[in-house]
Each structure stands twice: as structure tokens, then as C-alpha cells.
Image: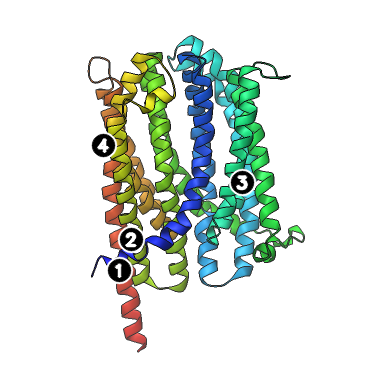
Amino acid sequence: MQIQRYTKEFWQNTLIAAPIALGQLGHILVAFIDNLMVGRLGAAQLAAVSLGNSLVFIALSLGIGFSFAITPLIAETDGANDIKKGRLHFHHGVIMCAVNGIVLFLALLVAKPILYYLDQPEEVVELAIPYLEIVAFSMIPLMIFQAFKQFADGLSQTRFAMYATLIANVINVIFNYFLIYGIWIFPRLEVEGAAWGTLISRFFMLGLLVYMLSRKRMFTPYFQFSNFSHIKWSEFRELFRLGFPTALQMLFEVAIFTAAIFLCGLLGTNAQAANQIALNLASMTFMVAVGLGVTATIRVGNQKGKKDYPNLRRIAISIFILVFLIEAVFAVLFIVFKDVFPTIYIDDIEVIVIASQLLVVAALFQLSDGIQVTILGALRGLQDVNIPTGICFIAYWVIGFPISWYLGKEDQMGAQGVWIGLLAGLTASAVMLYFRFNYLSKKLIRSSSHQYTTTS
């Protein structure tokens, strides 16, 4: 049957995607754990973590976007069995990510006064500033971690980053518990304690991943460091060519969710806290789609290296189908348990009511969000990044944001209106990106068929 051409790839897709999704979920679990523990302190403290992370997530999107350039390059060299070129991509990627981490740390420190000019509740801003200062420093180990992670992902070895991330989360929970509430010999730091827990766990995560990769024989050829004579600006230009548009893609999406935080903040502390709850829950299920998106980059990149374009298209479509089915299950769960999930975070009835309304909309955009991120991953595997970047900007900021701004007013639909705008933007992105992938993949197949006919 025709559908079996795609479903037979589900197992291989899942084997690659599951560790990525769990590893990415680990990053979200850091925020989840912070929210869960800080939420017990009150709505203002929970909103402060949300506000502080709003700037961190923007910086994070830029840094991770640049690091994503490593994966398709490594995947292509792996498909072509070119270790020497893959080693060059890896070494230059580590340097690029380390520099990015330092730059993003300094940028966050410079940008923190912005929080005073966003019309947010004063008590929330005062709590958010010290939290932001501490978490900003964690960008340095996190970005270097990303370089090693994307390198291993490009070789389809996705489990090591997962191990490091999940173990680091245990470290985060422990230090959160001691530092937020002042347990044992530790001071009671409340919101700042959550930030210190995040910082400590990210340094641990980096060290553990580097240790694991350096101990495996298959990575030995890539870990051969000599002097800096092999460092070339042309390699950095190649990484920048792929990384900068990818960073913009992530920035456009993260920025519209950040805008949602600010718009909900204008509606008051309760709306902002509810937005944080719904956003955190949606982010956790979204990590499955992110895992499949990276899988699309890896597998499409491999097929590109082999120049096997018919299988490239078939494998990519199999990933699109799989993510739709999985996200549909999450959508049903969000609707069924919309009144239950918010109670995990907080016991404020007004916050719970608003959050449950947002989860209904979140249930719907699970589908669009999952499809658009996997198609972006497939296009990244084709190293097509410029036009998708334009598509993301149009979808999120020409279509999505105006709807969020208008419907999110207090005299319209409030916080739920903000999220309807997010739904509109994500749906527009999914549709336009699919047209782009469909055009490019068919073009490559026609081109290779013509070339085969000519040579024959």
C-alpha cells in the first residue's frame, strides 16, 4: 500500500527522534521545575521567572539557531563518508558556539533594563532582574554544550546529549530545592535560588557530555586537535550562511511567544502567570516535534550527501505524518485535562481558569506547530534557509502578531485572543513551508532523473 512507504520509516524516525526529544524536554524541564517550585511562592514570583526567561529565550533562540548549522553539515559529510571535512565543521562549530555564548551573556546584561519599560507589574520586574543576571551567565556553558550536541546529532548519535541533559536535571532539582526554600545549610534565595540551580546544572551538563563523547571510539577521529592552522574563515562563513538565517527563524518564533508574555503582562499578573503555565505545558509537548524536526535535518542531510532524492522526499514526508499523529494525541490530552494541568503549578483559581482557556487554543496549534518545525528541519537538511526565514517572518509577524495584539486587548478576548494570534501564525507557517518543501524536493528529483537520463 502507498501509506506503507511512509509508515515503515516510523521506527527509524522514532529511534533517532526519541533521545533528541527527551534531551530537549530536559531543557524545558529546567523551566518546568523552576516554575513548579517557584509557583509555590506565589503568582508574582512565578510571573517573575516568566518575565526573566522572556529575554533569556530570545537569546537562547539566537544561540541555538546558530548551532543548528552544525547538524546538516555533519549529516551530509557522514552520508558522503568524509570524516576530514566533518572534523573541520565540528571544530569550527565549537569555536563559533563558545563565542556566541559569551556575546549572548553580555547582551543579556546590557538588555536587562528593558524590563523596566515594558509596563509590567513593578513587583514582578524587581524579582525578575536578579534572576535574569544569574541565568544569563549559563548561556556560556549551554552554547558550548549545543555545539557538541549538534555534532553528535549530525552523526545520528542522539542519546548522549539526552543522558547529559536528564542527569543535569536531577542536579537542577536538588539545588533548586536547597536554594529556593533554604534547606539544610543553604540560604533561602527564592527566585534567585532557581537561577543558581539552572546555572550549576548547565555547567555539569556540558562537562558530562564532553566526557562521554571523548570516551567513545567512533568520535575519536573528530577529537583530533592539533594547532590552529586548520582554522579557516571560509568554514565560519559556511556556518554563518546556514546559522544566521536559522537563528532568525527561531528568533521570529520565540519573539512572538515572548510578545505573548508581554501582552498577557499588560492584562495583569494573573494573566501573565496563566500564560506561563500554558506556555510551559505546550513547550514540553512541542519537544517531541523538535526531536522529529532534528531527525528530519539528519535524515534529509544524509540522503542529500548520498544524492538519493526520491528517498529524501519519502523519508521527510514520513516524518511529517508521524508528527501530525503524535501532536493530535497531545491535542486531545490538552482538551480533556485543561482544568487539571494548571493545578500542578498553582492553586490560584483565577489563574487556573485563564490557563485552562489557553490550553484549548494550545491544543489546536499543537498540530500546526509540529508540522512547521519538522518541515523547517527538512529544509535545513537541504541547506535551504533563506526563503524559509522570510516565510517565518511573514507568518509570525505579518499574520500572527497583529491578530494577537488586536484580540488580546482586555475589551476583546484577553489572553485567549493572544493565543489565537499564535495559532494563526503557526498555521500560516506550516502551509507556506510545506509548499516550499514540496517544490524543492520535486525539483531535485526531476533534476537527478534528467541527469541520469543524460548520462545514460
Q: Residue at x 40, y 73 (%)?
A: 308
246 versus 58 height, above or below? below
Disc 2: CA contacts within 10 A as few (<14), some (14-19) or many (>=20):
many
Q: Position of residue 145 (x, y in %)?
A: 62, 46
Q: Name the element at disc 2.
A: helix
The mark that comes first in sequence, 4 or 3, is 3
Q: Which residue is mark 1?
A: 5
- Is disc 1 placed on a helix, strand or loop? helix
Identity, as a three-letter code, of the amino acid under mark 2: Ser
Q: Report the residue marked by disc 3.
A: 164
Give yes or no for contact between labels 4 and 2 (Cβ–Cβ under 8 Å).
no
Q: Secondary structure at mark 3?
A: helix
Please state which of residues 114 and 149 is positioned toward the viewer in this rendering. 149
| Circle on res. 424 | 4
Residue identifier under label 2: 318
Could you tell me if the residues under marks 4 and 3 are in contact, i.e. CB atoms within 8 Å? no
Q: Is residue 411 above or below residue 206?
A: above
Work out which quarter of the rendered image holds the N terminus and state it. bottom left
Q: Tag 1: Cα neighbours inside 10 Å, few (<14), some, or many (≥20)?
A: few
Earlier along the polypeptide chain: callout 2 or callout 3?
3
Quarter of the figure with residue 5: bottom left
